[in-house]
Amino acid sequence: MSSEPDIRRIASAFALPGEFLSAERYGSGHINDTYAVTQSQGTGRRRFLLQRINQKVFRDPPGLMSNVSRVCSHAQARLRQEGRTDAERRALTLVPTRAGGDWHKDESGGHWRCYLFIEGATGHDVIRDENQAREAARAFGAFQSLLADLPGERLKETIPFFHHTPVRFENFRKALRADAHGRAARARAEIEFALSRECDVSVIVDGLADGSIPERVTHNDTKLNNVLLDDLTGEGVCVIDLDTVMPGSALYDFGDLVRTSTSPAAEDETDLSKVEMRLPMFRALVEGYVAAAGGFLTRRERELLPFSGKLITLEIGLRFLTDWLEGDVYFKVRRPDHNLDRCRTQFALVRSIEDQMEGMRAVVASLDR
Ligand code: ADP
Ligand code: GN1
Ligand code: MG
């Protein structure tokens, strides 16, 4: 799926207004192929977001699109019920194909979908200030709240065991045993770091299994750049990247916010001295998240908010390390050892979280009072 597709032709399969003017690759996601398409509209122009679903990652694109379509429709309906006049900016809207479907299959078997483009808002790769952290967390909390009454059958698991950290750990161990590219010797410290944290990996899955943590409809990929913040007001406007919306734990979503919104360093920063979990950012996240989701979070979920940050950061670090050991087959990489750099950054953040766990617990406790 690496050949450059004929975007004009693919765009013509969707019920877009006007004429095709241009298209460019867009965004910094690690998974899908994303294009901003500009169409004429009267004397003006309008953009749309065209995406090819990564089929190595998502094995059942029609099943995935059925989830996405249900989630978009429900979110739109709920926002309209709440009297929002800007619902199409607050939740994603799929543009139908000319045949009336939610997705288009091209001649090489690629599956494409098209969304309305949310203008005047940006997904940030690196957090700038506490307001952004608060707004991002509020938006993801509100998203969960919006989906709490999603009607119909349980959403499909678009990637089985996506946040099953013990399975991720086992996959890491298998990749290590195989060491198919002879890379393990160059990452002894990271491998030791991972192996010594096995005792943490089952806390959330055990809680889900014994019922002490409730299953919810969750986003599961709540990194900072998967929520668009208004360019003028900074407000969290629209949650995007809905491919992994499926049954999960609220802690997965909060944990990934801690991973991506408390450190001033980029996910692939190579100067590890810059990687740090900052308590004021964590506080802003808890404030924003509890403001939107506090109504339904249980006591146990609140207690585990700090731990979730550690666990999800460890889990994604394990996934980067596994992918590096396996020869970079999953995440898009832009340089040699990119996945190893990303793993190192995650593990440095895990360490920083561990060092500040008491302070993080105190933040949650102070907001519980
Ligand atoms: P990936 O799964 O590859 O991360 P995303 O769905 O997150 O793909 O899209 C990649 C990027 O495209 C996002 O980070 C965001 O910048 C941008 N984007 C996605 N959907 C929209 C949209 N509807 N409007 C504007 N920008 C969008
Ligand atoms: C991927 O799709 P994107 O870039 O928003 C990945 C997440 C990882 C993240 C790490 C489907 O997210 O699970 O946490 O990269 N998505 C998938 O940056 O694997
Ligand atoms: Mg994304």
Image (spheres, rainbow, N blue to C red):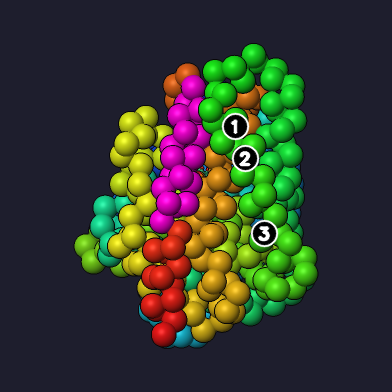
Task: Nearest to the eye among marks 3 and 1: give it.
Answer: 1
Foreground: 329 or 84?
329
Q: Is residue 190 left or right of residue 49?
A: right
Label 3 C-beta lies within 8 Å of the nearest ligand 2 atom = no
Query: Is 32 a magenta residue?
Result: no
Residue sitting at x 36%, y 34%: 272
Q: Which residues are magenta?
A: 337-356
**On the image, which quarter does residue 252 sit in?**
bottom right
* Residue with the mark numbered 3: 203
Residue at the top extreme of this rendering: 182
- Picture layout, residue 153 above or below residue 266: below
Q: Which mark is residue 116?
A: none
* Residue with the mark numbered 1: 192
Q: CA distance from mark 2 to mark 3?
A: 15 Å
Labelled pair 2, 3 in contact (Cβ < 8 Å): no
Query: As shown in the figure, which amino acid type bears the numbered disc 1?
Result: Glu
Residue sitting at x 54%, y 71%: 303
Labelled pair 2, 1 in contact (Cβ < 8 Å): yes
Q: CA distance from mark 2 to mark 1?
A: 6 Å
Of helix, strand and loop, which one carries label 1?
A: helix
Query: As shown in the figure, which amino acid type bears the numbered disc 2?
Result: Ser
- Picture layout, residue 76 above or below residue 279: below
**On the image, which quarter does residue 184 sit in?**
top right
Residue sitting at x 52%, y 53%: 310
* Residue with the mark numbered 2: 196
Residue at the left extreme of this rendering: 232
